[in-house]
Structure formats: C-alpha cells, structure tokens
Amino acid sequence: MKRIGIIGAGISGLFIANLFKRNSNYQITVFEKNHSIDLEGGYGIQLSVNSVKLLNKIGFDNFQYDKKCNPDKINFYSIKDPNKICDLRISDFNTEDSKYTTMRRSDLVDFLKTDLENLIKTNHNISKIDQENRKIQLTFENNEIFECDYLIVSDGIFSKSKNLISNNQIKLRYNNTLAIRGMIPHYSKIDHKNISLFLGPNFHHVIYPVNLNGDLNFIAIMKYNLSSNELKNYSLFSDKNFIKGILDNVPLEMKKFLNGIKELKIFPVFISENFYKTKNNNIHFIGDAFFAFSPSFAQGATQSIEGAYELFKSIENNTESDFFKKRVNKTKMVSNRSKFNQFAFHLSSPVTRFFRNIFLKRLVKNKKFLESYLGKIYR
C-alpha cells in the first residue's frame, strides 16, 4: 500500500483525497496548518461543466439542491449604461448530468471533507521536507514526522511547502489589481437566477446567486497600484481608512451594490510568473500551488478540481511523468484567456468600449468562436 501525504485542505487537496480514498491501494493523510478547515461563508465560486462532471464521481450530483444554482446565462452590462449589452448562454455547454454551477465555497468544502474527517490532521504547519531518500519525510512545527511515497502540495498560492521544496525559487507578481468581495442583498433590478457581469473603465464586477435562498455573491476586480511596502503590510487590508479609500474609488454607479454588502473583504491579486517542476517525480503540485492566474475567467476552483483529477489518474496509472506537461498546457490556455478577459473588461477609452460591445454582441452568438474559446476549457 502506497502512503500519500497531502498538504493543504482546500478544494484541490480535499477532492484528490476523496479520489484516493476510493482506491484501497493507497493510504492518505491530509495536513492542514490551521486549527480547523476554513468554512468562510460569503465566498462564492463558479464551477464549469468539466469540474461538475468530476465532482459527480464522488457524489456531488446528490448534494443538497438548494445550496447550489445552475445559471443559464451570463448577462453583460456596461457600468455607464443601464441597458444590457448582450448575454451568453453558458447552459449550452451543459450535459444532462453536469451543469454550470454557482455556490458558496464553504458549502463545497464542507461536502468534500464529509468522508475525510478521520484522515485530516489540523494544526500541522510544515517546517521541513526531506526528499533525498527513497521515502519523502515531512517534519511539522509540532515536531511530528511523517513519511510517504507520494507528496501532493495543495496549500495555495503562497505555498510554504513549494518554497521549501524549491529553496524559495517561486516568483509571484502583484497583478496591479485589488479584489473586492462580499455578499449583497437581493436587488429587484438584478437577474438573481443568472450571472451579471458589469464592465467599466479599469474595473469590473460580477454578481451571481450562490443558493436558492436569494443570496448573491459580489466580486469586483479594480486596477490599483500598491507600493512594495504596502504589499508587505498585511494589516493594511483590514484598516478601515484604507478600505474606505478603496471604496471611494469604486465607480459611482456601483456604490448602490456596496451599501448593504456583508462580509466585505479587500485583498491584492497575485499571479504566478512561472511553472516549477521538482526533480522528484513523486512530488506534485495542484491548485493555486501549481499556478495562480488572474481571476477574470472564473476558473480557479474548476482548474483546481480538474488538475487534482488528472494527477490522481496519472498516479493510479503510473504515468506521473505526463501530468506536468499536460497540466501546463491547459493552465497556459486558461491563463491567457484570463489575461485577455481582464484587458477587455477594463477598457477605458469610450471608443474602444464602443467597439468592444459591438464585437461582444456578435461573438456571443458565434458558435464556432464559443466552442473554441469556452468549449476547450469547459469540456
């Protein structure tokens, strides 16, 4: 029996743990640095069809129907104009059993950890990773030592494990954007059954339902320059004066959505600059620890799930050497689309915005384009 150590109890780590749990050839242990698994309430996620199909392999199709939504389309708006630009029918990519899904991140994490309670060790902060011997040896700050045949690193974009393995070679770049997120009250003028995307100069935001109770998730991406000292000041993003200054810069038309926002959080967006492959073929990265890209394509959770499944199958089939190259190719595709989306969403010139909207109206009806741009990602 092979022993597998998984560092990080986020979506990717918990999903791959569920997959291995169903194979008696593997013994798994999940290590989480925090005292408990994060079940933060107000954080919405979007899951495209490819990830829902994979989640169904572990019973997601039986998950509580009232805790998830299946939007039919994305409505595009200009912040400067109340009239809708166009809409894109994402349900065209659905299958009978797998549908585009929006929900709370906490509800998905809660579902993923349900059958893993005895396999998760919380309060385990990694301090050393020895990969020189046949077995991989993990040492934690509580002096506990664990040996495994495979190590799967899924502890997020600021992965401590990845830095230990790479000797701090990992480079992250501030994306010159801030993310503003929270939950907002129900608005009669918002299509609460679908996704609404508002485009504005150097700013865009998305509103979508996360359950059938009418709860709406708000996530905005705003261009914002921060100094190196500001980026190092972790307390800055909980400072009331700083938050007030950020919200004062939000387009006037959007302030109505922020008046009643709950669980407000503002944080800088970092993206990966490169890919890192270990010399040890039994150590792998998934989720944001593998690569973090701009959030403007709503693929973070989906790619975490998809990458975890690819790694599971490669280990199960003894084809681990193929995993890295395949995942890099898909990740580059998603990353490029994310960058392009952000560029298109944030156009500042009225002339370029005018022509962008014309192209949008045509492209959302062009099946060949949609199959190439979205189909290659969603399926």
Image (tube, rainbow, N blue to C red):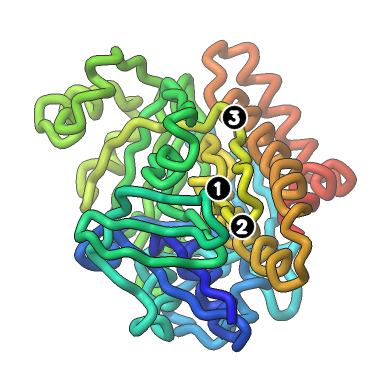
Q: Nearer the viewer, residue 205 or 181?
A: 181
Query: How many angstroms separate mark 2 from mark 3 (CA)?
Result: 20 Å
Query: How many angstroms separate mark 1 from mark 3 (CA)?
Result: 20 Å
Residue 342 at what x, y percent from top left?
56, 29
Mark 2 residue type: Asn
Q: Secondary structure at mark 2?
A: loop
Q: Secondary structure at mark 1?
A: loop
Residue 177 at what x, y percent from top left?
41, 25
Say left or right for 18 vs 158: right
Q: Is label 2 or label 3 in front?
A: 2
Residue 23 at what x, y percent from top left?
62, 84
Task: Give above or below for 2 relative to 129.
Answer: below
Task: Give above or below for 355 relative to 366.
Answer: above
Residue at 37% x, 43% y is 160
Q: Nearer the viewer, residue 89 or 16?
A: 16
Q: Quadrant of the N terminus?
A: bottom right
Q: Is label 1 or label 3 in front?
A: 3
- Per the image, the residue denoted by label 2 is 282
Say left or right for 243 vs 354: left
Task: Give the residue at the far front of this rendering.
Answer: 133
Label 3 crowd bin: few (<14), some (14–19), many (20+), radius 10 Å = few
Label 2 crowd bin: few (<14), some (14–19), many (20+), radius 10 Å = some
Callouts 2 and 3 close, C-beta under 8 Å: no
Query: How many angstroms separate mark 2 from mark 1 (CA)?
Result: 30 Å
Residue at 77% x, 71% y is 317
Q: Which mark is residue 274?
A: 3
Task: Give above or below for 338 relative to 114.
Answer: above
- Per the image, the residue denoted by label 1 is 298
Q: Quadrant of the C terminus?
A: bottom right
Residue at 24% x, 29% y is 247
